[in-house]
Amino acid sequence: MVLCQVPGVAVIAWMLKKMSMSASLRIFEGCACLACLWCTLSSYFNAPVVVAVASCAIYFFLIPCWCIINVLTPAVYPPLYRGSASGLLSAIAGLTGLVSPFLSAAISESSE
């Protein structure tokens, strides 16, 4: 998956020179949504190789989105609260990262 992230970051760096951050973010998020749809349809039709390729496409588009979001988020808050707000949001993101594996395991066990 890391091999899919690096070209995505290179493409977004090139795009940021050509257009604004918000336009680049919208394009990459839209492409990530299409890649998620592609992955979902591929898994529905039981095509594991296509699911792997679609997963790589998701990583290609989503990691650069996180890069842009990490740059844009501090600009939303006033300088007085910027560090606290960024730290709080980072902690919340970390908590969701801790909870999501257990939640997905519980959902997958209940669906069987």
Image (cartoon, grey):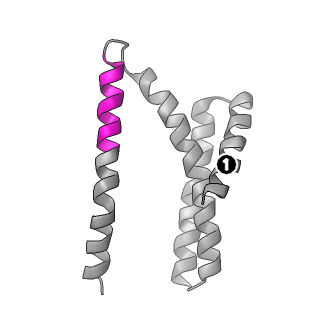
Please report the bounds of the magenta region as a residue range.
81-93
Decide whether residue 90 is among the magenta residues.
yes
Quadrant position of residue 59: bottom right
**Rendering coords of residue 11 (x, y %):** 72, 43
Q: Is residue 10 left or right of residue 54?
A: right
Q: Is any part of residue 6 visible from this angle?
A: yes
User: What residue is at 63 percent from the left and 60 percent from the top?
Assistant: 57
User: What residue is at 29 percent from the left and 82 percent from the top?
Assistant: 111
Q: Is residue 89 left or right of residue 17?
A: left
Which amino acid, by three-letter code, is at mark 1?
Val
**Rendering coords of residue 25 (x, y %):** 58, 40
Please tell me whether the stretch drawn in magenta is mainly helix, strand or loop.
helix
Dot 1 corresponds to which residue?
Answer: 6
Q: Residues within 10 Å of mark 1 (few under 14, many from 20)?
A: some
- For residue 109, above or below residue 52: below
**Rendering coords of residue 64 (x, y %):** 59, 43
